[in-house]
Image (tube, grey):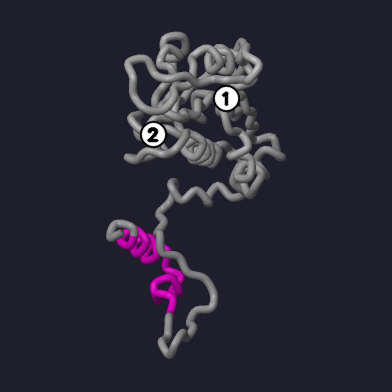
């Protein structure tokens, strides 16, 4: 899976990409991540990419042309490519969308919004899908992009060392335990639930399902 990220602030994402599972997946060539900064596609000496919105209102809007050029560079001659536009008003991103993305595409472009947004004329030139990670507004699209990229990467074969590590594909619980079996803190004993110690996997799955349901 090849991720093409259109963002004004690639440096804000690099620490996460260069850590843990994503870093290993890149090293193992399971995924790749490339950045395209609209500032690199301007024709003015200050690399300015924003202007006041037509119709009035606060803030600044990112111009269409630098973003269009960045998308075009990312797309190249690829015929089958998915473009996501991060937006609080977009379709809610889910694991099913992540799985579908992996099944259908090898290249994904994700456009990170900023300021008051990006000139909507980019959507008249490229087919894209507005996508949201939740019912709230963030300063920019970089954090949602990391969430989307992480979720999709988990579905790429070989990214996780053990395929069973995908909690979304098995019965799991938000409550987990490890050794020691029992410990004392401020005079109170804290034990692992007995069901997790009996070796009966049917009972354990039932407990996990019930525990997850009650959260």
The image shows residue 64, relative to residue 175, as above or below, that is above
Q: Are marks 2 and 1 in contact (CB under 8 Å)?
A: no
Depth order, front residue of 12/199: 12
Q: Is residue 204 magenta?
A: yes
Residue 13 is situated, as x and y percent measured from the top left of the image, at 59, 39
Callout in the foreground (2, 1): 2
Up-down relation of residue 29 to residue 166 (above or below): above
Which of these two is toward me, 87 or 158?
87
Which residue is tagged 2? 132
Q: Which residue is mark 1?
A: 106
- Separation of residues labelled 2 and 1 (CA atoms): 21 Å
Say what secondary structure mark 2 lies in: strand
Q: Residue furthest left?
A: 214
Mark 1 Cα shell of 10 Å, populated few (<14), some (14-19), many (≥20): some
Q: Earlier in the sequence, mark 2 or mark 1?
A: 1
In the picture, measured across the screen, residue 107 lies left or right of residue 211, that is right
Quadrant including the C terminus: bottom left
Q: Quadrant of residue 214?
A: bottom left
Location of residue 211 in the rendering, given as x and y in whole percent from the top left corner: 33, 62
Secondary structure type for disc 1 = loop
Looking at this rendering, what residue extends furthest in the right direction?
27
The magenta segment is 191-211
136 over 8 or under it: above or below: below
Residue at figure coordinates x 56%, y 15% from the top left: 66
Q: Residue at x 54, y 75 (%)?
A: 179
Foreground residue, 171 or 126?
A: 126
Please tell me whether residue 120 belongs to the stretch shown in magenta.
no
Q: Mark 2 packing: few (<14 Cα in 10 Å), some, or many (20+)?
A: many
Tally of marks: 2
* Residue positioned 39% across, 25% down in the render: 130
Q: Main secondary structure of the magenta part?
A: helix
């Amino acid at each position: 899976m090849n991720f093409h990220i259109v963002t004004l602030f690639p440096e804000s994402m690099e620490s996460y990409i260069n850590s843990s599972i994503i870093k290993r997946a890149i090293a193992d060539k399971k995924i790749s991540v490339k950045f395209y900064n609209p500032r690199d596609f301007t024709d003015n000496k200050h690399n300015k990419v924003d202007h006041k919105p037509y119709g009035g209102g606060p803030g600044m809007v990112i111009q269409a042309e630098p973003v269009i050029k960045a998308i075009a560079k990312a797309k190249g001659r690829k015929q089958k490519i998915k473009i996501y536009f991060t937006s609080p008003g977009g379709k809610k991103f889910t694991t099913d969308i992540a799985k579908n993305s992996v099944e259908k595409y090898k290249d994904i472009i994700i456009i990170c919004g900023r300021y008051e947004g990006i000139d909507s004329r980019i959507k008249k030139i490229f087919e894209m899908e507005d996508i949201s990670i939740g019912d709230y507004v963030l300063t920019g699209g970089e954090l949602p992009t990391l969430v989307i990229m992480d979720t999709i990467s988990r579905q790429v074969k070989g990214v996780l060392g053990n395929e069973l590590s995908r909690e979304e594909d098995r019965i799991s619980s938000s409550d987990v335990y490890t050794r020691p079996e029992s410990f004392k803190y401020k005079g109170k004993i804290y034990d692992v639930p007995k069901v997790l110690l009996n070796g009966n996997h049917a009972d354990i799955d039932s407990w996990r399902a019930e525990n997850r349901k009650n959260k």
